[in-house]
Structures are given as C-alpha cells and as structure tokens.
Image (cartoon, rainbow, N blue to C red):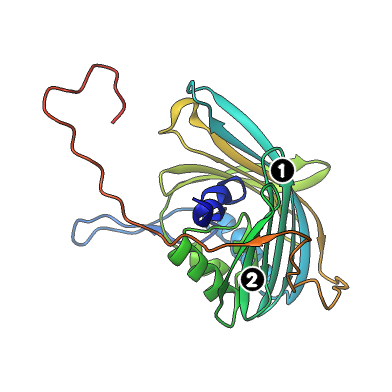
C-alpha cells in the first residue's frame, strides 16, 4: 500500500495542459478529401509565434493559480485550488512546486534523476531520467502515468505536441486577463474543450487556460491563470537538486498497470448501476 502512494496522490497536481497551439489540419478518412485549416491564417500565425518565442528561451520561471474540479462521492463537483511555481533551465533542469487545498507536491529533475515529493505524506519517489526535459516528461508519463501540470511549456517540442487532435478552432477576439491584453482562442482537442489566452505584443505569453470536459457530469473543468513570467532568472545552483525534508521516507513509484474490467454476471446489473 505504501509503495503506491505517490502514484495515487499525483492527481492533484497532474492535469497537464496539452499545448494545443498549432497549424494542424482536420483530415477526413475519405480518399482525396480536402484539408481545412483549424485556425485562420492570422490566428495560426499568433499561436505559432507564441510557440517559437517559448522555444527560444533557455531559462525562465512562471507562477500559476490553478483550479481543478473533482466529482465528490455524491457526484457533485468540488473545486480545489493550488498555487504553482515552475523553474526551467534547458535542456536538462526542471522544478515544479504545487501547494494548495489537497496538493503539496514537488517535481524535481536535475538532468540525471527525477523526483516526486508528496508533502502531505512526507514521502518521495525517484527514478533515473534521460538527458533532457522532453524525454524525461515522456518517461514519467509512459512508465508511471505521471503528468506534471503546465510542464509542457518547458518542452522544446512545444509546437510539435500541438499538431495533433485539434478541431473546431475559433478566434474569439481580444480580451483582457487581469489587466493584460490577450488574444482569446477556443478549440476542441482530445475529447475536451480548450480556451486559451495569449498576450498581445512582442511577448506572446500564455496568460490563461481553461479546459472543460463535456462528457463528464457538470462538464468539470481545469483552469490556470499564469503570471510572473521571468526570462532572466537568477537560479541558485541547488534549485534543481532534491533534498529530502527531515523524516521523509523514500518509496517506489508504482508502474503503470493494465487492469481488465471484470465482466458482470448475467442478470446481476440493476437500473442505475455504474459500469
């Protein structure tokens, strides 16, 4: 039971935000179908400009205020909130701290090892990591189903990630996000609806993200206000080195397992039962 605790508790911090900002086209399965741009050329240019700007930054940090809906035992949505700080030094350093209602997590990657610390239970798990951020995030997700909130913004392949699964893209217009003028976009991706606000001007920074899932009861959603962007940070040398707090216990990550759902016995299902 203790072995799996890190895996089970990552969910409060682990809704990644797939950066769906791209030039992907809708493709029909019928032969000879014509490709239709998801976004108009002006919108696509704005979003690609944001991707290229982020890729050009070698060191940066940002903060985010995140809210995450969760269905309670009674089926009604309950909103949890946490504050997030992210520190990036490409190609091989990343730290993400999350602290809030039900979340107290640190994800630390030092170029050789990535570590997830759960402050609520004072436990941590570590695994050998590849030599860059992109490969490390991929391994964490593939091997342990671990996805760190907003960490894709640190990926050098930001635009590439954005190139799949987008449909119904719409440029809404210019809005203001906490005093900052921003382009507002809406689109569908991977069975979820996204809204994205990108700052106008010379620094096309992401300022707000909202993800809603229409197929869930009450269309539960995840959102983040992103602020305090810093592209000239003064990182301490030990920022990306994980030091266990006093009394912290090291445990193991639980590997991803494929579980086959049991087949119900004929005649035992009742109306209203969940499957």
**Residue 172 x/y as whole percent:** 60, 41
In depth, the one of 196 and 218 nearer the eye is 218
**Residue 113 x/y as whole percent:** 61, 76
User: Which residue is denoted by mark 2 in the rendering?
Assistant: 52
**Mark 2 Cα within 10 Å, few/some/many (few <14, many 20+)?**
some
Q: Quadrant of the C terminus?
A: top left
The quadrant where residue 94 appears = bottom right
User: Which residue is denoted by mark 1 in the rendering?
Assistant: 82
Is 268 positioned to the left or the right of 145 in the image?
Answer: left
Is 244 positioned to the left or the right of 195 in the image?
Answer: right
Question: Is there any visible trace of residue 183 in the rendered image?
Answer: yes
Q: Are marks 2 and 1 in contact (CB under 8 Å)?
A: no
Q: Residue at x 71, y 37 (%)?
A: 101
**Residue 14 x/y as whole percent:** 57, 51
SS for tag 1?
strand
Q: Residue furthest top?
A: 271
SS for tag 2?
helix
Q: Residue at x 85, y 73 (%)?
A: 235
């Amino acid at each position: 039971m203790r072995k799996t605790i890190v895996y089970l508790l990552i969910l409060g911090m682990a809704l990644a935000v797939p950066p769906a900002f791209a030039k992907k086209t809708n493709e029909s399965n019928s032969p000879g179908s014509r490709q239709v741009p998801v976004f108009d050329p002006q919108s696509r240019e704005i979003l690609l400009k944001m991707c290229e700007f982020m890729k050009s930054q070698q060191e940066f940090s940002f903060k985010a205020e995140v809210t995450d809906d969760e269905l309670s035992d009674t089926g009604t949505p309950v909103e949890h909130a946490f504050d997030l700080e992210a520190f990036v030094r490409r190609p091989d350093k990343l730290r993400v701290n999350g602290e809030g209602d039900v979340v107290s997590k640190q994800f630390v990657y030092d170029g050789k090892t990535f570590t997830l610390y759960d402050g609520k239970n004072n436990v941590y798990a570590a695994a050998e990591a590849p030599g860059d951020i992109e490969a490390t995030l991929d391994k964490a997700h593939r091997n342990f189903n671990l996805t760190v909130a907003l960490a894709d913004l640190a990926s050098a392949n930001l635009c590439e990630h954005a190139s799949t699964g987008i449909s119904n893209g719409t440029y809404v217009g210019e809005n203001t996000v906490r005093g900052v003028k921003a382009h507002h976009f809406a689109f569908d991706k991977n069975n979820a609806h996204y809204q994205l606000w990108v700052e106008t001007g010379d620094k096309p920074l992401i300022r707000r993200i909202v993800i809603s899932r229409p197929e869930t009861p009450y269309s539960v959603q995840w959102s983040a206000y992103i602020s305090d962007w810093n592209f000239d940070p003064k990182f301490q040398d030990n920022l990306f080195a994980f030091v266990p707090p006093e009394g912290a216990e090291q445990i193991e990550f639980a590997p991803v397992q494929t579980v086959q759902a049991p087949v119900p016995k004929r005649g035992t299902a009742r109306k209203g039962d969940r499957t």
